[in-house]
Amino acid sequence: MTSEERGNISGDPEKRILILGVGNLLLGDEGVGVHVARKMMEMDFPPQVRVVEGGTDGFGLMHVLLEADRLILIDAVKGGGPPGSIYRFEIEDCPPFPDIFKTSVHQISILEVINLSGLIGSTPRTTIIGVEPKCLEMGMELSPEIEAKIPKVIQLIREEVVLSLGQFPEKRSVEVSST
Amino acid sequence: MGKRITIDPITRIEGHLKIEVEVENGKVKNAWSSGTMARGFEALLLGKDPRDASYVTSRFCGVCFSVHQMASVRALDAAFGAQVPWGGRLLRNLVMGAEYIYDHMVHFYHLSALDYIDIMAIANYTGKDRELNKVKEKIVGLVQRGDTFPLTPRYKPDEFSVKDPDVVISAVKHYLDALKMQIKAKNMGVIFGGRAPHYQSIVVGGFTQYPDINQVARFRSMLDELAAFVNEVYIPDVVAFGTGPLLPLAKAGIGGGHRNYLSYGSFEMDEAGKKLLFKPGVIFGLDGTKGKRVEPFNPEKITESIRYSWYKEDKPKHPYEGAQVFDLGRSDAYSFVKAPRYDNVPMEVGPLARGVVDQDPTLLGLMKDYGVKPGAVARHAARAIETKKVVDAMYHWCDELTAAMTRPGFKIHDTAHWEPPAEGEGAGFFEPPRGALGHWIRIKDHKIASYQAVVPSTWNASPRDERGIRGQYEESLIGVPVPDPENPINVVRVIRSFDPCLACAVHLIDPKTNEIRKFMVE
């Protein structure tokens, strides 16, 4: 499904939702997904919502992907906008693999892992919430302009969750571990 | 002057390793290996609480994260003077063992095998096996949709590629089975590791979480499934490939290189720490499979040269003394990778190094029986054979752990040495799946004063040194046949056989198109 078709989704309160933040914590704004996931691990979500901080892992995240019906992926994205721009798009909005996804992690990236997981199970519907980085230099902190966008990113993720479940998550439970 | 070919990146999808080769008369005449990305994460650690080191270093790499944690806690154990109880060491071993199974299996099936098979041969399968026909249907379906990535090899199949549809289809089925198996191996590590990636429970002094008997039972039953796969699928596949279609490459020892091998040794098998699963040692110039003495390993003989690297330093230094100051103006430099040397000599590290240093009878027997020389194919064999060795050791560690748990005063942590000392230094040596890994720490005023990691791929991928001696990747490419400069598949096979891992860093999504911009929400 592409972003144009987003209006057609119907909510399902039983849907297993995975909020997955990825990136390298040691490379400044590259770690934005990790920072967002860490903040969200402290928040209340119903039990079918899981928050995972995936670091720069690839293959190692396949097991959590396969246990989800819906994936919200948070990562740094080079979309060409000014630093701090926030993007929301469906995985299908991107042209097909391989030449467009310039990623590194060893030999295989998270987007390829999502693709590969389809070979042994069903791939969750995937929305990417991306933030345009400012600085990718070594460092464990975010740039102030990126840090300032985290509340908005979290709000967007919560909207996705509500849209997917068809209701506002009310049950109180905290997911702290990732696996 | 031969023709220059550049392969960038060499990793399956994208990485930071660039290989340049000069080809003359269908063979590689000269080679250069460049790490194209600046590293030096160690600088982040300076001034921090030493106990943070194991968590921060686990972020050095997204794939081999936990092994940095392990080398780091071993350096910290030494610097703090901690005596890790047997229970703590066993739990560390079990988590690392799971990592071995995961890593080696993924390397063979998902990162390497496609360099050796012609996947399109699947369409010619005419057998009646229901399972295999399902595989055929799936792959042919993907091909028809134009969506075979990342199953498609980047290079054209050549005379060594397996084209027999029956063999290819079963290899692809095992590729899919291994996808499921690697999930099990990951989940197994999490039983004791607490979470993945970036395990929480491995700390200086030992382990944080006491195991219960149900966890050990669960771990063991997952190990049973993985052991069956390793013994009945993985090893037979590697042996069948290596002694079948790839035997000419194996016998020619393609990709052998300097044939110097280094192993730091790892994995204590008994409480006294006398017996190790992998023995430490060094071999200079292995010729054939026997007759060469294994020398003892002396950590003082490690230096890092920066003669051809973009770093500011004058002469080769021991890792305790090394620093990470870049100098991009150096005229001859061509890599961000330093050149580690042992006794001034380049070394190969990894499964083949461990196997020959250990004089492993299964590996040496296989090499002798089939006339396999050290090289790319031998590396795959060594990796498979040592996976079984680790699996067998894991049963032993499970037994030891179960016995230790029932003894009074069972401990997993040396709590008396949890606080950082005012001063101290320590080296942590470990053999991760990819080979010798060392971390060096110095503590002053209870904080980290210096930190240095020498990673396995640095040994293997190093550039030339002061004497102009090539690194192991570079040397291993000399003489490799490249009949078609447009299709340097043998170069890729050789480098990939080392399980290169240099990317260790940037992960962002770069769609290389302005299309994504229209999805900007703020």
Image: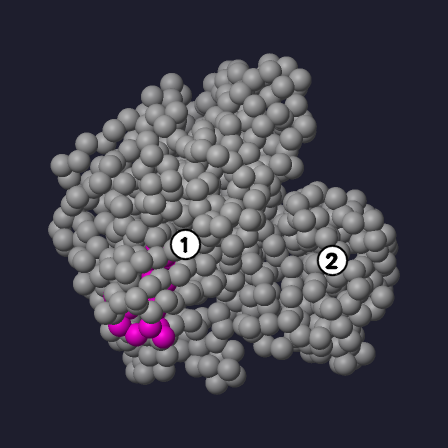
Is-magenta flag for residue B415?
A: no
Q: Secondary structure at mark 1?
A: strand
| Kind of residue at badge 2 | Pro
Marks 2 and 1 share the same chain: no
Asked whether, in this view, residue B81 is left or right of residue B165, the answer is right
Residue at the spot 38% in from the left edge and 67% down from the top edge: B5
Residue B486: tell me if it is visible.
yes
- For the N terminus of chain A, the quadrant is bottom right
Name above or below for residue B172 compared with residue B216.
below
Magenta region: which residues?
B481-497
Q: Residue at x 55, y 49 (%)?
A: B329
Please provide percent x and percent y for residue B346.
33, 41
Residue at image mark 1: B33
Proximity of marks 2 and 1: CB atoms separated by less than 8 Å: no
* Disc marking residue A91: none
Q: Residue at x 55, y 52 (%)?
A: B37
Q: Chain of mark 1?
A: B
Q: Which residue is mark 2?
A: A133
In-front residue for pair B429/A136: A136
Q: Does residue B350 appear to the left or right of A1 in the view shown?
A: left
* x then y, percent, for residue B365: 17, 45
Q: Is residue A141 shown above or below B517? A: above
Q: Is residue A158 visible?
A: no
Residue sitting nearer the eye, B119 or B460: B460
Is A119 or A167 nearer to us in this picture?
Answer: A119
Neighbours of disc 2 within 10 Å: few (<14), some (14-19), many (20+): many
